[in-house]
Image (cartoon, rainbow, N blue to C red):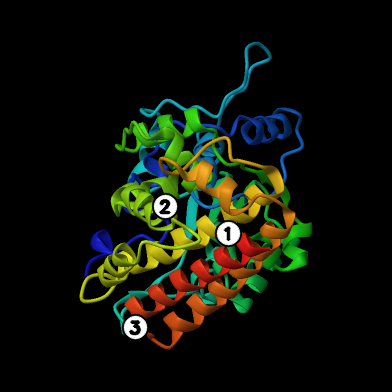
């Protein structure tokens, strides 16, 4: 397999790569924070770009990298912007993956297993010494993107830390982190954070349209994806919206479920080629329970992931006592799900067991 055909760990299936994404939606606050540091002469060498998956962190990193490497001259008049003409020579080099001033660190391909490695190894970081040495010889700026820093193993993290502790001149390291709490505290302390937020419904729809996924189901997608364009694309790619609607219909009769429909759902998660549907069903059941717990504390949801869902959640979880029961069940079933997948339990049996546990809890809440 050639380098051009290797899978990219930082690309969402069915969407353009972040370096190819023309417009970043919904992250104006993070953009402004970076531009303020740049224009005021307080540009940090290390930046930690945080937030949920799929909200534009990588797109922001690539836009910052392009902005820095294009040697922008931000004037005193007008609003500064990260936008760079796509025909700018540096922008074209970055888009082609051939810019000498940019280094991308991500999970490498394992030729032995023919899979992407589960973590970023120190080998992927070791060439930074050579990369940064180039900046000393030609006087140019160097930018490093680490996507994602959560995936650095200990040795790789320590290697990145050394560069953050003694940053070369004219260098910027952009670390993308979905779960920054997993990083070494010393890495976090040496970076300035740019926080990216979940996308509002209108920004999510614009981001999806740009990625080639226009949709009329903005409310449902925004609700189920939690403002993540990446999760929304995954839902669209794998029929997540009708699947969630099916789950809601099964539970609509609670405290008694529609058993034939539950059996049909379970059977659809078993057999060859059903792995994706099985995983998504587990995720959506977990989300349903989370929303039930939230409804008990906050009242009927203002938006819903499927027709009738808001009314159903309000009925199943009318108070904080019910909320605690649903939250505990979510935790228990999440652990059950992880264990079941780890030991390869029959998918249909696992789904049915979870559905029956939900029915049992609904009956208990109703009787309280």
Residue 359 appears in the picture as rendered = yes
Q: Nearer the viewer, residue 29 or 223?
A: 223
Q: Secondary structure at mark 1?
A: helix
Q: Which residue is mark 2?
A: 248
Q: CA distance from mark 1 to mark 3?
A: 54 Å
Residue 271 falls in image quadrant: bottom left
From what the image shows, is residue 19 above or below residue 333?
above
Q: Which residue is mark 3?
A: 346
Q: Residue visible at 55% across and 59% down?
A: 289
Find the residue positioned furthest to the front: 367
Residue 70 is situated, as x and y percent measured from the top left of the image, at: 50, 33
Find the residue positioned furthest to the bottom: 343
Q: Residue visible at 34% across and 31% down?
A: 216
> Disc 2 or disc 3, which is closer to the eye?
2
Q: Is residue 260 left or right of residue 90?
A: left
Please identify the quadrant where the C terminus is shown: bottom right
From what the image shows, is residue 112 above or below residue 352?
below
Q: Secondary structure at mark 2?
A: helix
**Disc 1 vs disc 3: Cβ atoms closer than 8 Å?**
no
Residue 203 is situated, as x and y percent measured from the top left of the image, at: 49, 30
């Amino acid at each position: 397999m050639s380098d051009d055909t290797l899978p990219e760990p930082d690309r969402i299936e069915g969407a353009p790569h972040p370096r190819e994404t023309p417009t970043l939606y919904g992250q104006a606050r993070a953009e402004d924070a970076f531009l303020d540091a740049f224009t005021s002469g307080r540009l940090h060498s290390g930046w930690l770009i945080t937030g949920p998956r799929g909200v534009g962190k990588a797109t922001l990193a690539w836009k910052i990298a392009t902005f820095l490497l294009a040697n922008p001259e931000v004037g005193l008049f007008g609003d500064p912007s990260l936008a760079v003409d796509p025909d700018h020579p540096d922008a074209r080099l970055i888009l082609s993956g051939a810019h000498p001033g940019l280094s991308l660190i991500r999970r490498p391909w394992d030729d032995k297993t023919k899979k992407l490695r589960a973590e970023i190894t120190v080998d992927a970081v070791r060439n930074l010494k050579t990369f940064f040495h180039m900046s000393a010889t030609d006087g140019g700026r160097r930018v490093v993107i680490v996507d994602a820093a959560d995936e650095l193993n200990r040795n790789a993290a320590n290697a990145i830390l050394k560069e953050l502790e003694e940053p070369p001149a004219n260098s910027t390291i952009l670390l993308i982190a979905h779960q920054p709490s997993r990083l070494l505290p010393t890495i976090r302390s040496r970076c300035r954070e740019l926080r990216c937020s979940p996308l509002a419904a209108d920004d999510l729809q614009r981001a999806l349209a740009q990625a080639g996924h226009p949709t009329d189901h903005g409310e449902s997608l925004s609700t189920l994806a939690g403002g993540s364009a990446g999760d929304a694309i995954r839902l669209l790619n794998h029929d997540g919206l009708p699947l969630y609607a099916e789950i809601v219909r099964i539970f609509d009769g609670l405290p008694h479920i529609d058993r034939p429909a539950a059996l049909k759902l379970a059977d659809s998660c078993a057999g060859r080629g059903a792995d994706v549907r099985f995983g998504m069903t587990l995720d959506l059941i977990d989300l349903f329970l989370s929303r039930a717990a939230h409804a008990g504390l906050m009242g009927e949801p203002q938006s819903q992931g499927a027709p009738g869902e808001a009314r159903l959640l309000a009925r199943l979880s009318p108070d904080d006592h019910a909320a605690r029961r649903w939250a505990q069940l979510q935790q228990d079933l999440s652990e059950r799900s992880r264990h079941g997948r780890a030991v390869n339990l029959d998918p249909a049996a696992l789904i049915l067991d979870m559905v029956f546990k939900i029915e049992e809890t609904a009956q208990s809440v109703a009787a309280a």
